[in-house]
Image (spheres, rainbow, N blue to C red):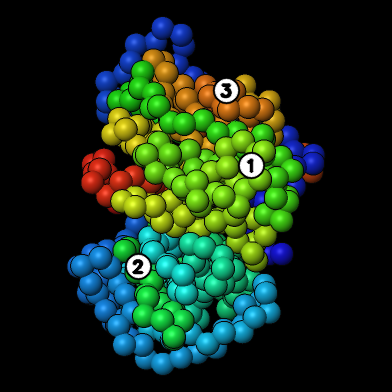
Amino acid sequence: MVTNPLRTAALAGLTALTLLGTTAPAGAVRPATGTTTVTHDEQITWQGWSGASLGAGTTAGTTVTATGLALGTPVGTIGYRDPHTGTRRTWAYGTWTSPVTQVGFGATELVASWNADTPAGTWLQVEVQGTYTTGTRTPWYVMGRWASGDADIKRTSVDKQTDKTSSVWTDTLAVDDPAAGVLLRAYQLRLTLYRDPTRTTTPVVRSVGAMSSAVPDRFTVTPSAGGIAWGTELAVPRHSQEIHAGHYPEYDGGGEAWCSPTSTEMVVEYWGRGPSSTDTAWVDPSYPDPTVNHAARMTYDYQYDGAGNWPFNTAYAASFPGLEAKVTRLHSLDELEHFIAASIPVVTSQSFLASELDGAGYGTAGHLMVVVGFTATGDVIVNDPASPSNAAVRHVYPRAQFEQIWLRTQRTTASGGTGSGSGGIVYLIKPAGVAWPQVAGSTNW
């Protein structure tokens, strides 16, 4: 199995980083917004298409409707042999290709995400073609073959995609050697929509886009001051992945590996959505919280062999009526506070040693949790699914420590090598009628 180097690292022999900055002392006065200016060394942008803006793309067999991009008169049929079942079926299909989109800087990574509905007998494929700073282009890379269910195809990423300058690691297009100076300056996205040729149902893509970024290798970041969401905590439902240990081991070994879908499900349920009792009827009735089991199954990537594919998680969230979701990066906890102030919880990705995060009691090469608020002195309140029970899911983690483990891209090991970090990856999930927060200078969501 090929895995994303951003989220996998050897745990044995790791040693703690020396972290910069301190947490606010007890009783600290809440700072005024904007009192500290942090110069960021990362560049991040989000660009996407939804609604009428999908009309800017080039269609072949697809049409832009009031609800999104759908199949019209297909351009033809094509066979697809599912590599995970061996079954070959014929599908009618059509495509949509975005305009060539300038990133605005030399990017080292790109992650696409999408919001779509795929009724029975339909699915979709998302591809990207990058343009390097040299003017040459990458191949068309597959970023995902996806359906909200698993009866027609097994949703999957595609391994072994590379042109020797860039590669796809599960869900991330990455420049292999940024120091060589050949970076991504533009890209196009391509959607292929499929349906059973004997039916008239169609997938509908409501939105598609990509986060492009250039985050330098770094062990530490300058702490942000924050302040606008101190003393705010959102009432996000609490789910433990650990109470699902041993459940359905065919989905990445069971609940102990389900941090991503458990976190996603918490936010979906915060917004009053989630799978119905009919949806979860397949779950053993003796198991608690069947919605978590369902989320794990419906985010599972059969090639990655896990439920941690980032855009598969946001696509799952957006499969519920009225929700929209995307994968991006944030610059700081200060930026994240704007989401909490707007009552939007945020799923974050991080890796750390037990000694690097006081109160966690464990270390991990990659873990998802939900930021639900901040204490009166600025520490981070999270729903951490790596907890022994639902009641134990709420944690308070020191602000400076949390910011380091979330935003860094590297960490040292006892052997002198490096482990990896996510560089500020988040899932942003909200109802369509709720506005994203407005932050001056931010173009990353």
Check whether the beta carbons of the residues at disc 3 and disc 1 lie within 8 A of each other: no
Q: Callout 3: few (<14), some (14-19), or many (20+) C-alpha neighbours within 10 Å?
A: few
Toward which corner of the image does residue 345 lie, by quadrant?
top left
* Marks 3 and 1, how far apart at CA: 21 Å
Q: Tell me which numbered mark, 2 or 1, is placed earlier along the sequence.
A: 2
Q: Residue at image x 38%, y 71%?
A: 203
**Lower position in the chain sequence, tag 3 or tag 1:** 1
Instruction: Tell me if residue 349 can be seen.
Output: no
Q: Give the quadrant of residue 439.
A: top left
Q: Which mark is residue 285?
A: 1
Q: Residue at x 23, y 46 (%)?
A: 433
- Label 2 SS: strand
Q: Which numbered marker is on residue 205?
A: 2
Which percent across, then down, holds residue 116? 38, 63
Q: Amino acid at mark 2?
A: Val
Residue 396 visible within the image? yes
Q: Which residue is mark 3?
A: 391
Looking at the rendered image, the disc whose residue lies closer to the viewer, 3 or 1, is: 1
Q: Which element carries disc 1, helix, strand or loop?
A: loop
Q: Residue at x 58, y 28 (%)?
A: 390
As drawn, is 183 to the left or to the right of 351?
left
Between the residue at mark 3 and the residue at mark 2, the CA separation in whole angstroms equals: 37 Å
Left or right: where 175 falls relative to 103: right
Q: Is residue 131 above or below residue 302?
A: below
For the residues marked 2 and 1, what is the alpha-carbon distance in whole angstroms?
34 Å
| Label 3 element class | helix
Residue shown at 38% from the left, 84% from the top: 94
Residue type at numbered disc 1: Pro
Question: Dot 2, how many residues are within 10 Å of its Cα: few (below 14), some (14-19), or many (20+)?
Answer: many
Can you give x and y, in whole percent of width and height, for residue 28 in the image? 39, 10
Task: Tell me where residue 36 sits by quadrant.
Answer: top left
Residue count near mark 1 (Cα–Cα under 10 Å), binned few <14, some 14–19, many ≥20? few
